[in-house]
Amino acid sequence: MDTTPIKPIALLGSTGSIGTQTLDVCDKLQIPVATLSARRNVALAEEQARRFNVRLVAMRDEAAARDLKSRLADTDTRVVSGESGVLEAAQYDCGTVVNAIVGEAGLAATLAVVELGRTLALANKESLVCAGERVMNLARERGATILPVDSEHSAIFQCLQGANGNKIKRIILTASGGAFRGFTREQMQNVTPEDALRHPNWSMGAKVTIDSATMMNKGLELIEAMHLFGVRAEHVKILVHRQSVVHSAVEFADGAVIAQLGTPDMRLPIQYALTYPARLPCPAPELDLAKLGSLTFEEPDLEAFPCLRLAIETAPRGDRFCAVLNRANETAVERFLRREIAFSDICGEVKNELSKLNQEVN
Ligand code: NDP
Ligand code: MG
């Protein structure tokens, strides 16, 4: 076993679902944390800063930063604010940077880390959806390493260990199906944010949970996979797998399919990105296949989940179209959560923005 001490990490989005689970892993493996960033959750940021004795905390929100500064006045922790503060936390001299910010807001940090040629553990899939070509080109140019944290992409990455340069024939990207798996379009007509936030298998932040309910999430992950693994959209097969145990799979030229399995717990992919290439004991529960009994796979219903169809159609059109898809979706999801639009309006809102771009381009 590799016993080299792990360098301190920088953790962006520390107060979120991925952020707190990352700290759980750091706790268990005694990985030091140099910097943290959040938007406005001061109470949790203070608790985390004290627990990990961090050097620097960035709060995106200025008022939150002022509050945190006075709360941490008795410590050596420096508090910075705004977008420049978040970038300072990202660029701090340390080992891996975990980007667990939600949404397009995470792109600037991704670019800053890649620009420095560092190692980025990337949960913020939106970075690759809205600027995948730019991010990957810059990573190649600067010699940066991007390690996936999203469970499906971590699974694909794990399946490729030992591939000995053999090319991917096909990726099988699995989807839980979200809160409305098996629903028809009509049945989703009057669903509320509370219904959509009730994910059957995973406990995650609000945005990604709604994206799972519309299945836009799987479309965003298709685009993420195309960039991370250099494959075309037609080489990614999306399958609904309700147990969320097969986290994804890779098929090679000879038809062999290599999959990664595990309990649905983000701590495993987070940990793998932090300790790669080493594998260490993980707090995630063990997989009990006999107890599970069976695993099922189905084609996704593109009629019931038009967001997925829209993302599949947009995926081959490059950064400019994917960025509009991503931004329009973020706006629509926020509006749905504020009850300004219906669940079934999300797709229409995104479609409208894409049509505007289409007209501009033609
Ligand atoms: P959460 O909403 O739980 O957490 C988001 C984090 O980002 C919080 O720390 C939040 O701070 C911070 N944040 C929000 N807005 C901004 C901003 N404008 N600038 C800087 N920081 C900001 O999200 P998740 O942890 O669920 O998701 C994070 C990313 O990981 C997403 O891209 C998601 O798609 C991806 N992902 C998540 C999974 C999961 O299991 N949760 C699984 C796979 C991928 P504050 O708390 O102060 O608002
Ligand atoms: Mg995922």
Image (spheres, rainbow, N blue to C red):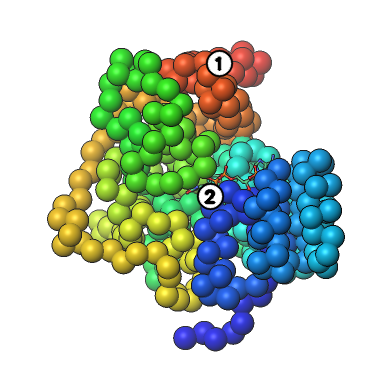
The front one of 302 and 186 is: 186
Image location of residue 181, percent across then percent down? 30, 32
Q: Which residue is mark 1?
A: 340
Quadrant of image for the C terminus: top right
Q: Amino acid at mark 1?
A: Glu
Q: Residue at x 31, y 66 (%)?
A: 286
Q: Is mark 2 within 8 Å of ligand 1?
A: yes
Query: Which residue does the image show at 66% across and 16% down from the upper left?
Result: 360
Residue 314 seen: yes
Query: Looking at the picture, how far across and down is residue 25, in whole percent?
Result: 52, 66
Image coordinates of residue 5 in percent, x first then y, are 61, 82
**Circle 2: element type:** helix
Q: Is 107 on the left or on the right of 224, as rendered?
A: right
Q: Is residue 342 left or right of residue 35?
A: left
Disc 2 residue crowd, few under 14, some 14–19, many 20+, Cα 10 Å: some
In this view, the residue in front, 294 or 335, is 335
Give the mark nearer the N terminus: 1 vs 2. Answer: 2
Q: Is residue 4 left or right of residue 252?
A: right
Kind of residue at badge 2: Ser
Can residue 249 be seen here? The reply is no
- The residue pinned by badge 2 equals 17
